[in-house]
Image (spheres, rainbow, N blue to C red):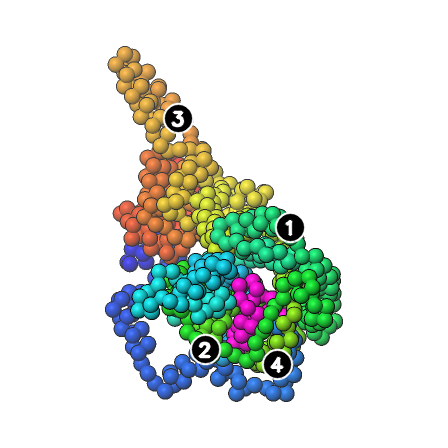
Amino acid sequence: MAEFNNIHSVTEMPEGDDGKRSFHHGMFLEPQEKKRSMKALVVKQAKKTCSCTPAKVKDYVFSFFPVLQWLPKYKLREYLLGDIMSGVIVGVLLVPQSIAYSLLAGQEPIYGLYTSFFSSIIYFIFGTSRHISVGIFGVICLMVGQVVDREIQRAGYDLEPAAVSVITGTAAYVNTTHPPVNQTLQELLCDKSCYAITVGATMTFIAGVYQVAMGFFQVGFVSVYLSDSLLSGFVTGASFTILTSQAKYLLGIDIPRSSGIGSLIATWINIFRNIHKTNICDLITSFLCFLVLIPTKELNEHFKSRLKAPVPVELFVIVAATLASHFGKLREVYGSGVAGHIPTGFLPPHPPDWNLIPNVALDAIPVAIIGFAITVSLSEMFAKKHGYSVKANQEMYAIGFCNIIPSFFHCFTTSAALAKTLVKESTGCRTQMSGVVTSLVILLVLLVIAPLFYSLQKCVLAVITIVNLRGALRKFKDLPKMWHLSRVDTVIWVVTMAASALISTEIGLLVGVCFSMLCVIFRTQRPEAPLLGWVAESETYESLSAYKNLQTKPGIVVFRFEAPLYYINKECFKSTLYKQTGVNPVWVKAAKKKAAKRMLREKEVDSGDCQTSISMDFVSEPLGFHTIVIDCCAVQFLDTAGIRTLKEVCKDYREIDVQVLLAQCNPSVRSSLIRGEFFEEGEDHLLFHSVHQAVDFALGAQRHSGTSISK
């Protein structure tokens, strides 16, 4: 690294007219010595990891179970009232949403209540955020429901009732020593709803394993590929799919749930084909619920600063609709679809179906990524707002265990939910003790109140689900502002939203990630590359195309490339540099060779005088500059193609008597240049720490050259 130390320390210029030597002073930077012994690093890390002391064990236990840290310090008088109030309110809001979102996940209502109960308890133990509410989230429920419907069809549960009875009767005589041919025969003791929660719980278990593995291997960086615009577009696109899946309940028609690519369009086609079968009772009920819910929700938002707690209008609607359905006998008289029997208590724990894991393992990947990305982003957002810190890896453990443990208790996938988190924060939540209160509210419903919802119409649950999509659908109002701030982010939002809605949620997420990465690549492939001018009475150089009244130094061109220089944009770098300077050295060299050949031919015919005149005419054509200064402040890194490109550019311009100087290279770029043997012997002075320093050097060299010629 010795040559690195001597980069442009002091450059001595030859004597000028006054007989004195001039010195161009530069900075002397001595690099830090880096120990790069991989063996030493591995041994050090192994000792750190494998060492076991009582203090280290205590720290590990306390970091893995954050509740042990904050619960002994709990300020009872200061925190308890706010936690109880927020816990009760979130619990009251969560009961109807848990029942409604169960339909979205293809499950019976009781399983939504189980999910909300267990997730709140487990996050209380493992979570580091004080404010987020972990439970049922609409987009996750949609993704789970699509997989559940697919597996139910594969297992044959969507056969006609007569066909199912024939299969059941036949299977009664099947010899148990011989494996049945049809998968349906293996599941005779499990009806459709039982198989649905088995699929959902198995998928939840695998998603939780993925999330815990991400925390263990510290791969939370995956979430950086899910930008805010991408997540927002994905949620909005999925909201259209959620709305479409609930439309059949609003109309009271019975159509199969479409899945796969283009399911949104296929569902609407089926709806319009069966529109004549609309249940008028369900349609009127849906309309009345919309009339009550939407204005009340808007009033809640409008007066949220004045209200101590939002009005639990969803619970009032569910109670009123259940009473009206029960006493009006809407199911018996009009054939309205109802929630049916909701048992009390808990079912015995049951492990996931290990045979289903190969079927759902791939589907669980996007569910796991979306779940932890939303949870971590919400945790960090509220932690920053309230002045405390959260651990991203511990949050992944927390949300992973919120899926792994409940999967043994007939639950489906959960994550943090923005709407309920906002309610939780605004109603006085101070710690996750409010999550325990929420679980107690849901436990009360599970043990006592649940059977009373037998007559609740499914269309009411669908209305609740759709009304809660307002926040995601309102993102369309923000598009003009988003377009003004960043057109690229707006295009990413639109592409992700359209792909998630029109193709499928999983493919839409993949399309969004790939498209956003392509946008990053395209922006580095053709970056801004302006010429720079000097700001008078300063040492600053700025873009000539962006600012007025900038000055240029005679004979010097300052060029800035605002991106890393690597294999994708190396040709763009060269072409832009040639275009901005107006001189392509390759063409100039070709013209010289052509002129030389022409002179040789004319030498054979004409006298030497003619040759001399032609040669002088050609040489006298000025280029307009003698130095190019490349400002590398925005070049984060170079690869081998980038180093080779810089070598070619310097060599080509040198052959037409133009020197190329590099300025403001960061340590990584300087190191790459040295390792790539960019500098020939004695050329290390061509690397400068500032553009102003490089320009001064070029001007001094030109003055000295002019003085030498005049002498």
* Residue drawn at x 72%, y 71% as measured from the top left: 327
Residue 306, horizontal then vertical, whole percent: 74, 71
For residue 349, the mark is 2
Q: Identify residue for label 1.
A: 275
Q: Earlier in the sequence, mark 3 or mark 1?
A: 1
- Residue type, mark 2 in image: Pro
Q: Main secondary structure of the magenta part?
A: helix
Nearer the observer: mark 3 or 1; the answer is: 1
The residue range painted magenta reads 96-121
For residue 115, the mark is none
Q: Looking at the picture, does residue 204 appear above or below residue 635?
A: below
Residue 274 sits inside the magenta stretch: no
Q: Earlier in the sequence, mark 4 or mark 2?
A: 2
From the viewer's perspective, tell me whether residue 273 is left or right of residue 170.
right
C-alpha distance separating marks 4 and 2: 20 Å
- Answer whether labels 4 and 1 touch (C-beta < 8 Å): no
Q: Looking at the picture, does residue 279 appear above or below residue 587?
A: below
C-alpha distance separating marks 4 and 1: 39 Å
Q: Identify residue for label 3.
A: 620
Q: Earlier in the sequence, mark 2 or mark 1?
A: 1
In this view, the residue in front, 357 or 30, is 357
* Residue drawn at x 48%, y 73% as measured from the top left: 410
Q: Earlier in the sequence, mark 4 or mark 1?
A: 1
C-alpha distance separating marks 2 and 3: 92 Å
Q: Identify residue for label 4.
A: 448
C-alpha distance separating marks 2 and 1: 42 Å
Residue 140, horizontal then vertical, whole percent: 52, 63
Q: Count the numbered circles shown.
A: 4
